[in-house]
């Protein structure tokens, strides 16, 4: 669990502590009346919170333990203490702390839910997936709209590849959210639907898989993997026209992801004897975007393969100006140059174009957690968020003439 999530729990607890409806100054606990306000007035409590804000966990635990003792062990402070043990990596201790709270008599429903939520996080942190799922499910029985339990549950189901369960959990999250958040929920539901389709594909249930991919596209017309997979199923069924149609819809709906369908479309067109169609498609996309280096690369490869390396090289140089650290471009440029017998004037242009470029290997970056990847991923392996990868580019290389004129 990241520090933000942790802070979120903590804040939720503190807000609950300060403003919760359930708050009463006095509470009967184990046969004696506890003054809950005493806890907040204790200097240890304030000190503990200060250490917490400064991320100094050990002294925070020490002060909060003293505060708890002085105030007759209020539930809220022990919840926080348990969370701090978990944060330190002492999962066993955290579980013990939270479990002992469950033994308390007369727990109110919301208190019970809060303790189970923390316990669920302990289990999750310790890798006890089944028990974590059980705890979060129990939280939802007590507090059906608990968004924090729902989103944790969804991530656990995703980790276990229980896509159907993840899907229905996301539906519950969407149902209780504000109307403005709908698009993001639809986007995630589409990815989950696509995963359900892939699971069907693994079982060789092609008809069901195709239905799922269609459903994913209905949820979010920009879901790229669903188009790719739908086309693959159609191709497998011998329906080349259907496959082509699916991939062309991807190109139309998400031009920035169109490149994912290029090699599929190129061979499908070739198979149907329509060789010019691929070049036409690329030219249309090139006319629509000056920034799309992948379509220039695809057309260049296609042109070189069909005997036009000189035209290909011009496209590659254009692409290089947009994205000077794409290794695939450099490799293709060298292949094309060698095709043209390393004509010195062309080699010099290449050298000029790359002089100021910085090269690197992991161009895809998660906008949420900054995780880097060499390939495009639909779900971040680090923060588990859906569709968060963008291509990071450094300052583009300048064209020779621009360099001269500046
Ligand atoms: Zn991430």
Image (cartoon, rainbow, N blue to C red):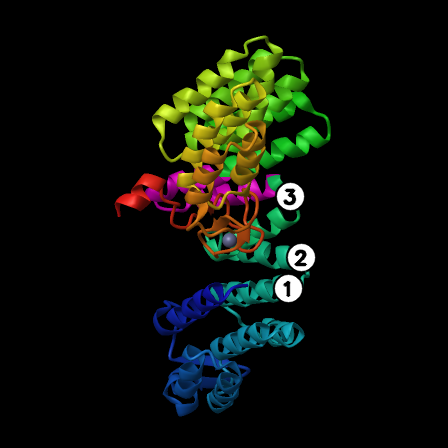
| 296 sits left or right of 94 in the view | left
Residue 346 magenta-highlighted: no
Residue holding disc 3: 162
Tag 2 near tag 1, CB within 8 Å: yes
Residue holding disc 1: 123
Which residue of the protein is positioned furthest toward the right in this rendering? 203
Nearer-the-camera pick, 239 or 78: 239
Q: Which residues are magenta?
A: 164-188
Establish whether ligand 1 lies closer than 8 Å to the Cβ of label 2: no
Name the element at disc 1. Answer: helix
Res 175 seen here:
no
Q: Main secondary structure of the magenta part?
A: helix
Residue sitting at 49 percent across and 20 percent down? 248
Earlier in the chain: of badge 1 and badge 3, it is 1
Residue holding disc 2: 129
x then y, percent, for residue 128: 68, 61
- How far, Cα to Cα, is label 2 from label 3? 12 Å
| 366 sits left or right of 231 in the view | left
**Vertical comparison of 49 with 327: above or below:** below
Name the element at disc 2. Answer: helix
x then y, percent, for residue 48: 44, 85
- How far, Cα to Cα, is label 1 from label 3? 18 Å
Residue sitting at 47 percent across and 22 percent down? 249
x then y, percent, for residue 359: 50, 51
Name the element at disc 3. Answer: loop
Using the image, tell me which numbered label, if any, was put on residue 359.
none
Nearer-the-camera pick, 366 or 306: 306
């Amino acid at each position: 669990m990241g520090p933000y999530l942790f802070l979120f729990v903590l804040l939720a607890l503190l807000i609950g502590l300060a403003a919760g409806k359930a708050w009463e100054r006095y509470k009967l606990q184990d046969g004696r009346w506890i003054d809950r306000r005493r806890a907040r007035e204790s200097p240890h409590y304030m000190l503990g919170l200060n250490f917490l804000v400064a991320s100094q966990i050990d002294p925070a635990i020490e002060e909060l333990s003293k505060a708890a003792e002085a105030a007759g062990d209020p539930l809220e402070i022990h919840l926080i203490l348990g969370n701090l043990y978990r944060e330190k990596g002492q999962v066993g201790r955290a579980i013990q702390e939270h479990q002992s709270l469950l033994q308390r008599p007369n727990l109110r429903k919301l208190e019970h839910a809060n303790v189970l939520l923390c316990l669920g996080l302990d289990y999750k942190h310790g890798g006890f997936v089944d028990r974590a799922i059980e705890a979060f499910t129990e939280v939802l029985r007590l507090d059906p709209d608990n968004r924090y339990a729902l989103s944790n549950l969804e991530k656990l189901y995703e980790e276990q590849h229980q896509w159907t369960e993840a899907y229905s959990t996301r539906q519950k999250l969407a149902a209780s959210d504000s109307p403005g958040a709908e698009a993001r929920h639809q986007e995630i539901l589409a990815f989950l639907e696509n995963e359900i389709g892939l699971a069907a594909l693994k079982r060789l249930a092609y008809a069901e898989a195709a239905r799922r991919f269609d459903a994913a596209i209905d949820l979010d017309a920009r879901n790229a993997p669903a188009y790719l997979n739908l086309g693959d199923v159609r191709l497998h069924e011998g329906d080349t026209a259907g496959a082509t149609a699916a991939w062309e819809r991807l190109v139309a709906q998400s031009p920035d992801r169109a490149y994912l369908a290029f090699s599929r479309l190129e061979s499908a067109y070739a198979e149907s004897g329509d060789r010019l169609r691929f070049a036409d498609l690329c030219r249309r996309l090139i006319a629509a975007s000056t920034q799309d280096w992948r379509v220039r690369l695809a057309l260049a490869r296609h042109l070189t393969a069909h005997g036009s390396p000189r035209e290909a090289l011009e496209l590659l140089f254009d692409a290089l100006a947009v994205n000077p650290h794409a290794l695939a471009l450099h490799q293709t440029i060298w292949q094309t140059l060698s095709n043209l017998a390393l004509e010195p004037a062309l080699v010099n242009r290449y050298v000029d174009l790359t002089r100021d470029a910085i090269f690197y290997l992991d161009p895809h970056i998660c906008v949420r957690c900054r995780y880097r990847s060499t390939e495009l991923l639909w779900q971040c392996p680090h923060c588990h968020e859906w569709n968060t990868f963008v291509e990071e580019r450094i300052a583009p290389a300048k064209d020779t003439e621009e360099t001269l004129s500046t």
